[in-house]
Image (tube, rainbow, N blue to C red):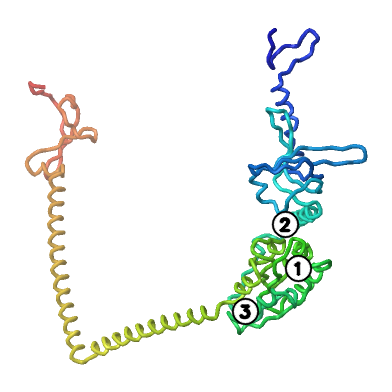
Amino acid sequence: MMLRGPSSRPDHFGTQILGVSEVSRLICDLLDDNRLRQIWVRGEVTNYKNHVSGHRYFSLSEQDGRDSAMINCVMWRTYASGLGFTPKNGMDVLAWGSVEVYEPHGRYQLIVREMLPAGLGERHLLVERWRCELEAEGLFSPERKQSLPAFPRRVGVVTSPTGAAVRDILSVISRRYPATEVILSPTAVQGDGAHTEIAEAIRRIDGLADVIIVGRGGGSFEDLFPFNHPDVVRAVAACGTPVISAVGHEVDVTLCDFAADLRAPTPSAAAERAVPDRQEVLQELRGYEKRMEALLSHRIEALGREVGDLRARMHPRRLERRVHERMQRLAEHEELLRRAALSRVRQERSRLAEVRADLEGKDPLAILDRGYCIVESDGKIVKNAGDLSPGERAVLRMKGGQCRAIVEEITYDKDI
């Protein structure tokens, strides 16, 4: 028996016979749908296996009454290394990825790139939705960013009055630039309703300081959640005073960071960016002072030399000598000009004589002085004897006048 490949013709029942590989390709084509790309899937972890290679293999299941559904999942080592928790069987999770088909086995599975516990994941999705909405409003646009003042007189701080953040900020500012006044706008920084207090604290201090620090110390995603709220982001974006966002530690990022004019990794770093370092300012001033002294000293020396030069030039004997030198030089230039003028006149006269001689040599009437005459007929000069005919009238132009003649006979030269 010979089996036909995918290009087989219909059998005697009229049915198309497909090869296994062709069926797999059809499945791939059917599942190549954007609706199955970059999607969030919620389900219960089952059959979880942490492979020695670092890859994670598991399934996500869902029970709806009597019906149940399951999808196989794999999370490659590259993505699994970034997991912030340890998945366990029975855990309710949110998985983000794309559905793909492993063609050799004809098996589809969800390739997971990110996974979160369901409760926390829902808040992550909410923050992502807020981010898209606020970005569409233009609140994160770089064009909105303001520059920080170089030497602020007042620094506003929006944070908890009892937290470590305010103590760190006060410590840094008092050490770096104690001349700056710090104004605190107290607020809760975590918990239900904290976002409302934070937004109000920002609006309350706007215009009372030269720069504002909004932030708090480190914490979990839940602790920092109020700084992702649109109320806080809009308050920061609408602030007329430059804002530095300092929420959490260096690895923490909130939506407040995107709307602020500058993001600092910690509250202490925000205080360092808000005010200059007194020692560096003093050192820079001393450098300016030295450069100014050097420039003034150099300028005074140059002016002294210039005054000495002027004094020497204005001395009577030296001035008289300079006048005599200038008169002598003027006389020399006068003589040079006179000689040049005479030479030019001689050259022009010689050229004029040459032109006159050339013109005289080309004068057609000059030959009349040597006894020749010019024969004209009908107003034209006769150049050849053949141009005349017996009986024709001609004019003979000679020196001193002309005469009229009648041609009686024409004799030609033998060699013509």
Would you call the spot at circle 3 few (<14 residues within 10 Å), some (14-19), or many (20 or more)? Answer: many
What's the residue type where badge 1 is placed?
A: Ala
Sequence-wise, the earlier of marks 2 and 1 is 2
Say few, some or many: other residues with alpha carbon within 10 Å of mark 1 (under 14 / 14 to 19 / 20 or more): many
Most distant residue in the bottom direction: 316
Distance between mark 3 and mark 2 Cα atoms: 33 Å
Number of marks in picture: 3
Badge 2 marks a residue whose secondary structure is helix
Picture coordinates of residue 319, whole percent (x, y)? 21, 88
Residue 286 point in image, percent of width and height: 46, 82
Q: Are marks 3 and 2 in contact (CB under 8 Å)?
A: no
Q: CA distance from mark 1 to mark 3?
A: 25 Å
Q: Quadrant of the N terminus?
A: top right
Q: Which mark is residue 235?
A: 1
| 354 shown above or below 312 | above
Question: What's the residue at 69%, 12% (across, down)?
Answer: 4
